[in-house]
């Protein structure tokens, strides 16, 4: 349908591609993309409906201008109305392809608007479109949503059953990034406190308290509880307050075994914050981007924590964080006592991974893939080298040794 | 010690995040020459040269920065070599004309000769880099 909303058109086109394999009802010819994008103004379909008798829709099929006519003997009118358009696309008026249409554009337009007006009250409706490439009204619904409800509605509105196509499609969502506000809150997204930015490591329940875990140095003071207030993704956004620091053990001298002389030690750089009432979060959820080590920050899905464990040298480990996204590499060292640059802190028994990291990734989840979107939680990232090619994390056993037992999935 | 040394500086203009019309200037200041084995004070200066505040996304609770000393293209010393730094972003707004100074010191434990010194300030995107300056280590 020739509506002004480019967004809707693009969304509908995307949905058509997604839904191509799961339609019911009438088969669509399916518009094929033109080989070259052109800037010529597309004809106004409403005007065509008024000037071409029986006009039922216009689209490009492999670049060829193609029209539906309920009376194919009116081809001459179509050629006259669309001749200039065809020429702008490199075709003579006689090259315009005419298909037998069943419904007039005016009827389809009226039915589409009527269905659209009421259909969005039904659960799971994604889009309503006058599908000019199929000469039908097309309704996209989420998987599992009722087709019968839409068909019943259309029937009540006087839309012929054969004029309606209902297709399952993915919901259209905003393309959020790891640095955007994301609800429900999942691991890997940006958190803001004071004048610092970090990432969420994982969601957890501790003693019945809904929580998230991040790095200890991602609190107002590393070690010790000061009630750090967290915002996701920025405090300047509305409804961005998500929780308050509640657990962050102090760093200690002479922490046995292995704390070096004169240093302050812990076995994990981890802290826990309690979610504020009403903040939605996904237990076990980690934001997923389009692939490892590709630099993308756009969220395309969610990993699910299904187990916890420790890594050995040679294992592949992953992290998702707000700065460098999803990175993946090989575990190179385990149980390393690691000095923290610019401090008197030594983190005991940490794990090194040969994978990308950047400022702002502190607090990120570290995990191993176990098949599909299932992952094994390995720990909390806190550090990296100057080149951004190696990250350091606190193993999950160290984290739970210091924060107490956590339900993470 | 700064006494008796001749200092030189090098600057590089870069764009502030989201404010390409408001440049930041990164300057490295180091002595032109020092005696072998003596400390070499190095200062990195990040200056907002515009007439509007500029927000920068630096790293570390204490701001992380790197100093690299090279001779004939080979790294002789690097401040952040073989250290683990906390991967936290510090959001800092520089007022018009404000300068952030970051100081480091290197003991010139290298053979006499001509060296270059470079400064790098990591951000959550591309690092801010100062142009190199020359350093002569004297016997």
Image (cartoon, rainbow, N blue to C red):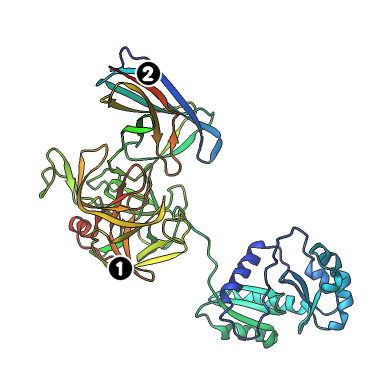
* Relative height, residue A176 to residue A360 (above, below): below
For label 1, the residue is: A409
Tell me the quarter of the picture where residue A253 sits: top left
* Relative height, residue A151 to residue B68 (above, below): below
- From where the camera sits, is residue A131 visible? yes
Q: Position of residue A119 (x, y in %)?
A: 61, 77
Residue at mark 2: chain: B
For label 2, the residue is: B32
Q: Residue furthest top?
A: B4
Q: Residue at x 54, y 83 (%)?
A: A146
Tell me the quarter of the picture where residue A343 sits: top left
Tell me the quarter of the picture where residue A380 sits: bottom left
Mark 2 and mark 1: Cα distance apart in space: 59 Å
Within 10 Å of the Cα at label 2, are there few (<14), some (14-19), or many (20+) other Cα atoms?
some
Q: Position of residue A135 (x, y in %)?
A: 72, 79
Q: Nearer the viewer, residue B90 or A146?
A: B90
| Residue A15 circle label | none
């Amino acid at each position: 349908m020739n509506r002004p909303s480019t967004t809707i058109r693009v969304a509908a086109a995307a949905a058509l591609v997604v839904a191509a394999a799961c339609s019911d009802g009438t088969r669509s010819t399916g518009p094929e993309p033109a080989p070259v994008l052109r800037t010529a103004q597309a004809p106004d379909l409403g005007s065509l409906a008024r000037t071409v008798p029986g006009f039922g829709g216009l689209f490009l099929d492999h670049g060829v201008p193609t029209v539906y006519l309920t009376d194919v003997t009116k081809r001459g009118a179509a050629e006259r109305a669309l001749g200039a358009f065809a020429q702008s696309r490199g075709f003579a008026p006689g090259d315009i392809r005419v298909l037998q249409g069943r419904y007039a554009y005016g009827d389809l337009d009226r039915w589409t608007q009527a269905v659209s007006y009421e259909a969005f009250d039904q659960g799971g409706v994604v889009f309503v479109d006058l599908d000019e490439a199929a000469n039908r009204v097309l309704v996209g619904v989420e998987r599992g949503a009722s087709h019968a409800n839409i068909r019943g509605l259309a029937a009540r509105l006087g839309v012929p059953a054969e004029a309606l196509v209902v297709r399952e499609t993915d919901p259209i969502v905003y393309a959020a990034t790891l640095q955007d506000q994301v609800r429900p809150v999942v691991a890997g997204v940006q958190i803001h406190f004071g004048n610092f930015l970090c990432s969420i490591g994982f969601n957890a329940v501790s003693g019945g308290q809904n929580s998230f875990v991040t790095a200890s140095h991602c609190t107002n003071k590393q070690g010790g509880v000061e009630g750090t207030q967290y915002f996701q993704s920025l405090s300047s956004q509305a409804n961005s307050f998500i929780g308050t620091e509640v657990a962050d053990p102090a760093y200690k001298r002479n922490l046995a075994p292995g704390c070096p002389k004169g240093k302050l030690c812990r076995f994990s750089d981890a802290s826990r914050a309690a979610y504020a009432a009403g903040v939605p979060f996904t237990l076990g959820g980690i934001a997923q981007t389009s692939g490892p080590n590709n630099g993308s920050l756009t969220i395309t899905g969610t990993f699910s924590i299904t187990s916890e464990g420790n890594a050995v040298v040679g294992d592949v480990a992953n992290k998702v964080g707000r700065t460098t996204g999803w990175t993946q590499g090989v575990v190179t060292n385990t149980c390393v006592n690691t000095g923290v640059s610019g401090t008197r802190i030594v983190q005991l028994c940490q794990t090194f991974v040969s994978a990308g990291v950047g400022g702002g990734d502190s607090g990120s989840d570290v995990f191993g893939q176990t098949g599909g979107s299932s992952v094994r939680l390995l720990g909390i990232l806190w550090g990296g080298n100057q080149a951004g090619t190696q990250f350091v994390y606190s193993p999950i056993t160290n984290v739970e040794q210091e924060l107490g037992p956590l339900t993470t999935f | 010690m700064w006494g008796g040394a001749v200092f030189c500086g090098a600057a590089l203009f870069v764009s502030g995040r989201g404010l390409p019309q408001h440049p930041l200037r990164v300057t490295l200041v180091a002595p032109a020459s020092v005696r072998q084995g003596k400390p070499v004070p190095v200062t990195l200066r990040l200056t907002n040269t515009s007439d509007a505040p500029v927000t920068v996304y630096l790293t570390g609770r204490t701001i992380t920065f790197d100093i690299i000393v090279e001779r004939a293209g080979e790294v002789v010393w690097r401040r952040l070599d073989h250290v683990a730094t906390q991967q936290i972003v510090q959001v800092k707004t520089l007022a018009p004309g404000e300068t952030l100074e970051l100081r480091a010191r290197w003991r010139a434990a290298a053979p006499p000769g001509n060296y270059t010194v470079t400064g790098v300030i990591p951000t959550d995107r591309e690092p801010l880099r100062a142009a190199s300056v020359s350093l002569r280590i004297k016997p």
